[in-house]
């Protein structure tokens, strides 16, 4: 069962990486939101042992944090 969770986590990370490749036309704030959501999803997944709720919650919190990050001037 653990191998299925590992494969799902790997697939999620690959999906996020491929999704970020399409960020060329996004504003910096949009990029920060996407990066925050991806990092939050991975961290939520790891911290909760692969829980779906932890992954989704981490993505939501990471997206909000990423959205609020102000680019350097």
Image (tube, helix red, strand yellow):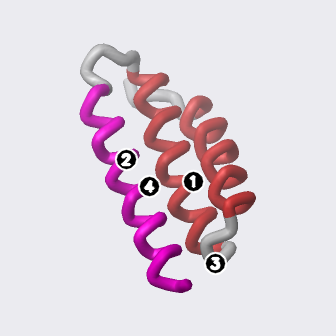
Verify whether residue 12 appears in magenta: yes
Residue placed most toward the observer, 64 or 48: 48
Q: Nearer the viewer, mark 1 or mark 4?
A: 4
Task: Locate residue 24, reporting x and y percent.
Answer: 25, 21
Residue range highlighted in magenta: 1-22
Q: Say which quadrant the N terminus sits in.
A: bottom right
- What number of labels is visible? 4
Alpha carbon separation for disc pair 2 and 4 = 5 Å
Q: Are marks 4 and 3 in contact (CB under 8 Å)?
A: no
Q: Nearer the viewer, mark 2 or mark 1?
A: 2
Q: Is residue 57 left or right of residue 4?
A: right
Counting other residues with Cα less than 10 Å from the Cα at mark 3, is it few (<14), some (14-19), or many (20 or more)? few
Counting other residues with Cα less than 10 Å from the Cα at mark 1, is it few (<14), some (14-19), or many (20 or more)? many
Q: Is residue 12 left or right of residue 5?
A: left
Q: Secondary structure at mark 3?
A: loop
Q: Secondary structure at mark 2?
A: helix
Q: Secondary structure at mark 4?
A: helix
Q: Which residue is mark 2?
A: 15
Name the disc covering residue 12, or none: 4
Alpha carbon separation for disc pair 3 and 1 = 14 Å
Q: Earlier in the sequence, mark 2 or mark 3?
A: 2
Q: Which residue is mark 1?
A: 40
Q: Are marks 2 and 4 in contact (CB under 8 Å)?
A: yes
Q: Are marks 3 and 1 in contact (CB under 8 Å)?
A: no
Q: Earlier in the sequence, mark 4 or mark 3?
A: 4
Q: Which residue is mark 3?
A: 49
Instruction: Please identify the quarter of the rendering in which residue 11 is found.
Output: bottom left
Q: Main secondary structure of the magenta part?
A: helix
Picture residue at 67% right of the left edge, 51% below the top: 56
């Amino acid at each position: 069962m653990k191998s299925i969770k590992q494969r799902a986590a790997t697939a999620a990370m690959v999906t996020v990486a491929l999704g970020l490749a399409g960020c060329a036309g996004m504003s910096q704030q949009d990029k920060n939101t996407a990066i925050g959501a991806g990092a939050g999803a991975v961290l939520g997944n790891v911290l909760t042992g692969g829980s779906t709720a932890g992954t989704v919650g981490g993505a939501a919190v990471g997206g909000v944090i990423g959205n609020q990050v102000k680019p350097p001037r």
